[in-house]
Image: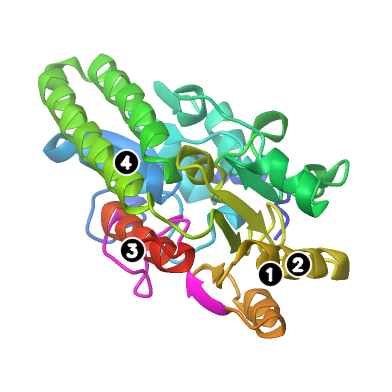
Amino acid sequence: MNVRRHHISAAALAAVTALGLGTLTACSSDSAAAGNTDKFDVVASFYPMAFLAEQIGGEHVNVTSLTQPGQEPHDLEISAKQTAQLQESDAALYLKGLQPTVDEAVGQSEVKTKIDASTLTSLEEHGAGTGGHEEEHADEHGAEEEPGHEDEHGHEGEGGKDPHIWLDPVKYAEVAEGVGKAFEKADPDHAADYKKNTEALVGKLNDLNTEFETGLKDRKTDVFITTHAAFGYLAERYGLTEEAISGLDPESEPSGARVKELQKTAKADGVTTVFYETLVSDKTAKTLAGDAGLKTDVLDPIEGITDSSRGDDYFQVMEANLEALRTALGAK
C-alpha cells in the first residue's frame, strides 16, 4: 500500500472555483457543508484528528472528515469537492506526513487556521522492530533493519518519522492540548469551553495511559508481532517490542528471510499471537501464524471506525487493544 503523491490538477482547482457553496455537502450526511454553517467549521484529515476536533469543539464546531469510515487513510485522494470544503472551512486539522494529498491540499488552500498535529508533539523514527527493548532485541535476533528500509514505504512522516502518534495516549494528549489552544485562538468567543473540553479530554487520556501501565505490568513477554509498524509509540511507552511483518507498509509482502526471522523471534520470546488490523487484509498475518503455530487477533491502529471495530470510538477501541495485548503478552 505505497502512497503515491498526487498533485491537484489545474482542472480540479478550476472545478473547485466553479462549485457554488450551496451545492456542497459535507462528507458526513448528517452535517452541513464545511464553511457553510454558523459554527466553527473544521475539516479534519482522518478519524483521530476528527475525534479530537469533536471532543474539544463540542457544540461549537462542525467537523467534516476527509477520510470516509472504512477507507484506508493512506490511500486517500482529495476530490475537487473536498478541496472546496477546505477552502471554505475555518480550520484544517491534519497530520503532516500521513496523507500526502492532504498535505498538498492544505498547503495550497487559504484556510485561516492550519493545525498540523505533527508539530504538537515529538515524532520519532520507527522501523520493523520497535519499542523499549529494540536495540538489545535486534542484537539478540539479528533483526537489524536493512538500510533504506523506510524509504521503500510511503506513509512515514517527515524525514522518515513515524506518524502514528495517536496510539500513545500521552502523545495524543499533547496533541489535544495544542489543538485546544489553536481553537481558543481561532474562535475566542468560545475559548473557555474549548479549554474546559480540552482539560476533560486530556484527563481521560491520562486515565487511559494509567490503564495501560497497570494492565501490562505483570506480563510473560514484551514482544508482539503486527502486520505493520503502527504501534511503535505505544510499544515505547510501555516497554514493549513491536515486530512488524511488513514494516510501515501493511500490504507489502514480507521477504522469506523476514518470515523466518519472525518465527525465530516468536519461539525465543514466547510470542503467542500475530496481530492484524481491520482495514487491510489479514492474509499475511494468518499465513505466518499458521506456519509458526500461533494464534491471530486484532490490534486496531484506529485509523477509522467501522462496523467491524471493537468499539464505537477511540477510547473503546483502545481498551479493546489493551485487552488483546494483555492476553497475547500473558499479563496477569
Q: Name the residue: 16% across, 19% down.
A: 191
Q: Which residue is mark 2?
A: 264
Q: Which residue is mark 4?
A: 209
Label located before the other in sequence (1 or 3): 1
Label located before the other in sequence (2 or 3): 2
Distance between mark 1 and mark 2 Cα atoms? 5 Å
Give, as a single range, the part of the protein colored magenta.
Answer: 295-313
* Amino acid type, label 4: Asn
Distance between mark 4 and mark 3 Cα atoms? 14 Å
Dividing the picture into quadrants, the one containing residue 104 is top right
Q: Name the residue: 32% across, 53% down.
A: 215
Query: What is the x, y in percent for residue 8?
Result: 65, 42
* Amino acid type, label 1: Lys
Dot 1 alpha-carbon crowd within 10 angstroms: few under 14, some 14 to 19, many 20 or more? few
262 w.r.t. 239: above or below: below
Dividing the picture into quadrants, the one containing residue 34 is top left
Q: Which residue is mark 3?
A: 320
Distance between mark 1 and mark 3 Cα atoms? 26 Å
Query: What is the x, y in percent for residue 98?
Result: 58, 42
Q: Which residue is mark 1?
A: 267
Task: Say whether marks 1 and 2 touch (CB < 8 Å).
Answer: yes
In the image, taking residue 194 as reference, residue 216 lies left or right, namely right
Distance between mark 2 and mark 3 Cα atoms? 28 Å
Q: Name the residue: 61% across, 39% down.
A: 162
Magenta span: predominant SS is: loop
